[in-house]
Image (cartoon, rainbow, N blue to C red):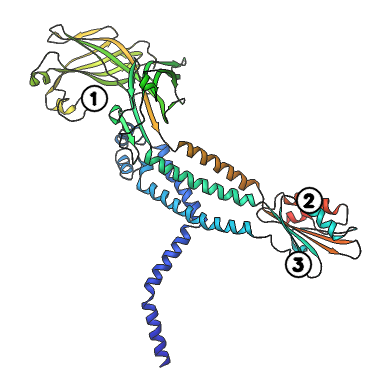
Amino acid sequence: MTGQHTGADAGQRYRGTPARRVLALARNTWRGLTSMRVALILLFLLAVAAFPGAVLPQRMVNDALVAEYIADHGWWGRLLDRLQFFDVYGSVWFSAIYLLLLVSLVGCLVPRSAEYLRSMRDRPVLTPRNLRRLPHYRQATLDVDADEVIARASTRLTGWRRVERTEPDGSRTISAERGYLRETGNLVFHFALLGLIIAFAVGHMYSYEGQVIVHADGSEFCNSGIYAYDTFNPGLTVDGTELTPFCVKVNDFEADYLPNGQPENYRADIEYQSGEDLDTGTWRPYELQVNHPLRTEGDRVYLLGHGFAPEFTVTFPDGQQRRQATQWRPNDQVTLLSDGATKFDPPGVTDATERRSNQIAVTGLFAPTAHFDGAVLSSANADLLDPAVAVDVMRGDLGIDSGYGQSIFEIDENMVEQGKLERVARENLRLGEELELDDGTRIAFDGVQRWASLQVSHDPTQQWVLAFSIVMLAGLAASLTIKRRRIWIRVTPDGGTRSVVALGGLARTDQAGYGEEFTRIATELLGDAERPAHDGTEGERS
């Protein structure tokens, strides 16, 4: 009967254990997640996960380059795209590691901070009974009483956390500790790392970044809404309605090149308005250079690059003219050989159908320094030395009235395939030359303008990131350079005014260097009195 009751009780306990098993699993998972080892593993994984963002093009930086990479690498590029490798910092897996690291650091630092505060309030530990067993040990008999030895030792140990005690046999001891700032630096480093992670997360929510091309002929750009940008990447809480107001005017752009054609320096002559200047109409000059951004009203304006806008003048059969310079896109960053499309509507045509059937697009290649291999145009240099274009003139319906978005750099190939847009001329033109179409329309290549590519970045947490980074370095330096060590002194009266003084030392974290410090303290307290069998040097080797 006893065995039967025991089996029934065991079965009841077994049936009642699923909840306990779930709680135990959750408890063990939490303990593992909040351990320092897991935090370090997650930190390493975060660094590994960020690596693709450094070697692969990212959509938030250059969407066109991502599309080109996918097209060039076929199935491999499409696979990387599905796995979010072109949007690393916004991917699910990167965010998961990020959040787990945040939770791990919080769970790890809270108990460590509590333990650190308790240790700061605790008094140094009792003097060990046998100091000879410590790595560092010295003993000598001095012709002074215990009071004088204790007073001399207390003076020498100024700056140490110490406590004096009296043992039952009448011996007097000093327990002293130093190097608490090592743990302080360790905690400061990890709290700063936590703050850095939080600052990055907050910055991702409230920051924005946009790119815009501005012609270097006095054209202006104003940070008044997302419609003013060519591309815009908002933070999670940014809708583009409350951007920091300021305006930039690009007056000129200059590029310096080495004899081999490599760029040496880019600079844009700009003026800007922000704050009260917007009300007064005051423009302030600034020379914008690569890696020398304009900082105004909490935003930063960077110079990313530049290019060219060939200027075409179209003279229609009735004598009316249309002149336009549209930026063309560099497809060779070394020579700035560029492609693009400049589009024209026929003037004075009110009928929509007739107007759509007589639109003109000048498409092709532009070379700042022309080099012809037969009839094929290429560019020999990125500097504007001998400009030329190789153009196809398209006439018909460009599709710009369809209601769908269209790239300014290209024509709609669907219109070509449907026969609504046809090529009516193909020719190479140097600066000042023109061609004539079958209906008498003349197209002249009569100028080149420069444009500058600007990037506006807004990150309200940038200063916090810098501050936390500096604090991290300071905490790391403290944790690596400061040593946690202890020293104990026992003074035993030896009749009259004589005292037996024993010193023991222990480095809690690192023995390196403590032997010399212990030897100096012992020498100052004991002088040339008798030395023991082992000292600091011997202890270090052990």
Quarter of the image that includes the C terminus: bottom right
User: Against 14, is 326 above or below?
Assistant: above
Residue under label 2? 156
Identify the residue at horizontal 29%, vertical 15% (top origin).
310
Query: Amino acid type of disc 1?
Result: Glu
Residue under label 3? 129
Residue under label 1? 410
Indicate the position of residue 263 as horizontal and vertical percent values: 44, 19
**Going by the image, does 158 lie left or right of 373?**
right
Is there a contact, CB below 8 Å, between mark 3 and mark 1?
Answer: no
Indicate the position of residue 311 as horizontal and vertical percent values: 27, 13
For residue 387, which quarter of the picture? Answer: top left
**Going by the image, does 102 lie left or right of 242?**
right
Mark 3 or 1: in front is 3
Numbered disc 1: secondary structure: loop
Query: Amino acid type of disc 3?
Result: Arg
**For marks 3 and 1 on the same chain, the one whose residue lies earlier in the sequence:** 3
Tell me how far mark 3 sits from mark 1, CA to CA: 88 Å
Residue toward you, 532 or 292? 292
Residue 401 in sight in this render: yes
**For marks 1 and 2 on the same chain, the one whose residue lies earlier in the sequence:** 2
